[in-house]
Amino acid sequence: MPDHQQLTETRQAEQDRTPDELGQVMGRIARTLQEEHGDVEATLSSITAAAVATVPGTDMASVSLVIRRRVDPHAATSELAREIDSLQSEFDEGPCLDALREEQTVRVDDLASESRWPRFATEAARRGARSMLSFQLFTDGDNLGALNLYARQPHSFDAESESVGQIFASHASIALSAARQESNLRSAMDRRDLIGQAKGILMERHRLTAAQAFELLVRASSHTNRKLFDVADELTSTGTMTTD
């Protein structure tokens, strides 16, 4: 493990980075995120990898996403980061959850002596995480999750880390939101195409109009209490359609 002098020297080198150099780093990150083209998981992996390389003091990173009111860890850069992130959901306490619920940046200087989340902090320190920074990721009021940064040494994060991390989290929020929107759009287009294929099968098989074929799909969906997409998927995959 690095000693205090090594940490100090590393931090000084990070702080000596000029605003222009930081701008270039953020520009490269933004271009990388744009190249993911709607792949949410790939976007998250780019976010966490870039955070480790960009935010002073960071050894590991993960993203906690809110999915149907559950907080799930994603794109952890190490197994330890994934474990620590999961602990917060297990204990229902921790910096990530505070960042999510209170829309703020949460910094922990030393988990070994932290009293705000006693169960989480004790277990996280035991496993080898000593410092944390959590930034809420959100866009236009849409709470997406939190970017969690971890360090193996206490007092690894300072005001510079928070400043750089906040800038990065803002870029990450926009990139993540855009990836989700593109992913949802592609999913919607795929569903529309599949329903169109199912309509075509029914039109050819029963000599129906497009409207009549769609009505058959809707009726099957209602009678079997299944989504329209699932009915269409069954028909295009098997050639048959359950109607009751």
Image: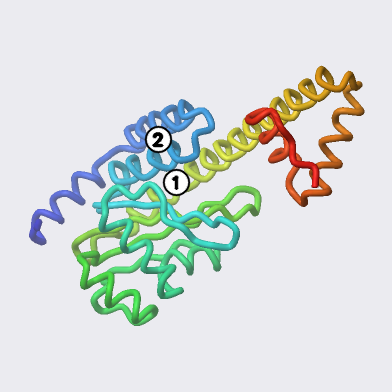
Quadrant housing the N terminus = bottom left
Left or right of 187? Residue 132 is left
- Residue 156, percent across and down? 24, 60
Q: Residues within 10 Å of mark 1 (few under 14, many from 20)?
A: few
Question: Residues at badges 2 and 1 in contact (C-beta under 8 Å)?
Answer: yes
- Residue 236, percent across and down? 67, 28
> Which residue is found at the position 44% from the left and 51% from the top?
166
Q: Quadrant of residue 126?
A: bottom left
Question: Label 1, on which residue?
Answer: 167
Measure the alpha-carbon separation of dots 2 and 1.
Answer: 9 Å
> Which residue is found at the position 53% from the left and 62% from the top?
70
Residue in the foreground of this view, choosing between 14 and 174: 174
- Residue 69, percent across and down? 58, 62
Q: Quadrant of residue 197?
A: top right
> Which residue is found at the position 36% from the left and 45% from the top?
48
Q: Earlier in the sequence, mark 2 or mark 1?
A: 2
User: The residue under label 1 is which amino acid type?
Assistant: Ile
- Residue 35, percent across and down? 46, 26
Q: Which mark is residue 26?
A: 2
Q: Is residue 206 above or below residue 128?
A: above
Residue in the foreground of this view, choosing between 25 and 66: 66
Q: Is residue 29 above or below residue 220?
A: above
Q: Is residue 67 above or below residue 22?
A: below
> Which residue is found at the position 10% from the left and 54% from the top?
6
User: The residue under label 2 is which amino acid type?
Assistant: Met
SS state under label 1: helix
